[in-house]
């Protein structure tokens, strides 16, 4: 019997079944109206599916940018820690590492979530500022601010990308439903026009591909 579309099927399957349906209709006199009715919906789903793929790729790019920029912030925090340790060695009476990293070191901060890590980096920046503009570590303030800014921007970009993906998916699902509805209408109208037996021939069958492949295999002599 004719296979029906359902919401568990991907857009690719929706499109595949529908195009195969139109191909059969084009070969059948009187069935051209079904092609006319469903073609715009096939095209619409193709467009929406492409849009979703594009937004998913942009989301992946945003995620990659975030991870890349997080690595840059990690490196900057390590650099500051190393600089503070070197300063302490050269100025044993004026230690600053404990001031900048009161919880024991940078490794704890690097295990934080990205947002919490950015907040911790802001605290480090303020502690460096408290040392005064003449302190050697003050040179780290600007690059640290830049690293924090890149991470926060990347977080915002990723959130925006996720929102766009959700919107694209929702639009695609609505378009899938519209195509399924027309596919069903075509089937019901085909039954009225040609009868159920012939109408089934205008739609892809649910017969197992394994069965077909088995029938195509050469038999042994």
Image (spheres, grey):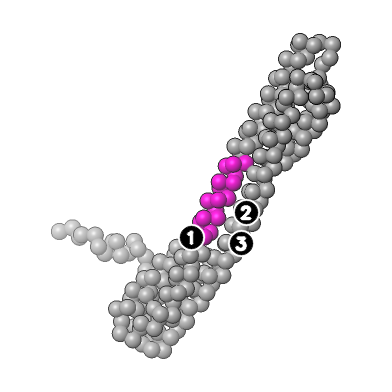
Q: Which image quarter holds the C terminus?
A: bottom left
The mark nearer the N terminus, 1 or 3, is 1
Question: Quadrant of residue 120 in the image?
Answer: top right
Gap in angstroms between the C-alphas marked 2 and 3: 9 Å
- Region of the chain picked out in magenta, as a range: 51-66
Question: Quadrant of residue 206 in the image?
Answer: bottom left
Gap in angstroms between the C-alphas marked 1 and 2: 16 Å
Q: Which residue is mark 2?
A: 162
Gap in angstroms between the C-alphas marked 1 and 3: 13 Å
Q: Which residue is mark 3?
A: 167
Image point 65% across, 28% down: which residue? 75
Question: Quadrant of residue 115 in the image?
Answer: top right
The mark nearer the N terminus, 2 or 3, is 2
Q: Position of residue 44 (x, y in %)?
A: 48, 69
The mark nearer the N terminus, 1 or 2, is 1
Q: Which image quarter holds the N terminus?
A: bottom left
Image point 72% across, 26% down: which residue? 140
Image point 61% across, 53% down: which residue? 161
């Amino acid at each position: 019997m004719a296979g029906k579309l359902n919401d568990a099927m991907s857009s690719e399957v929706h499109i595949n079944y529908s195009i195969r349906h139109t191909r059969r209709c084009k070969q059948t006199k009187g069935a051209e109206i079904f092609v006319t009715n469903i073609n715009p919906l096939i095209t619409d789903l193709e467009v929406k599916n492409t849009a979703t793929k594009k937004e998913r790729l942009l989301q992946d790019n945003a995620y990659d940018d975030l991870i890349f920029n997080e690595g840059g912030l990690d490196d900057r925090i390590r650099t500051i820690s190393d600089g503070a340790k070197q300063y302490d060695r050269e100025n044993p009476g004026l230690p600053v590492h404990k001031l900048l990293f009161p919880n024991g070191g940078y490794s704890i901060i690097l295990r934080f979530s990205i947002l919490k890590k950015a907040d911790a980096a802001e605290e480090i920046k303020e502690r460096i500022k408290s040392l005064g503009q003449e302190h050697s570590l003050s040179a780290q303030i600007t690059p640290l601010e830049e690293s924090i800014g890149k991470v926060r921007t990347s977080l915002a970009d990723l959130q925006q990308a996720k929102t766009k993906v959700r919107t694209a998916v929702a639009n695609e699902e609505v378009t899938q439903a519209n195509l399924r509805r027309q596919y069903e209408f075509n089937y019901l109208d085909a039954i009225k026009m040609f009868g159920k037996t012939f109408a089934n021939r205008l739609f892809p069958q649910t017969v197992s591909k394994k069965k077909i492949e088995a029938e195509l295999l050469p038999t042994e002599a």
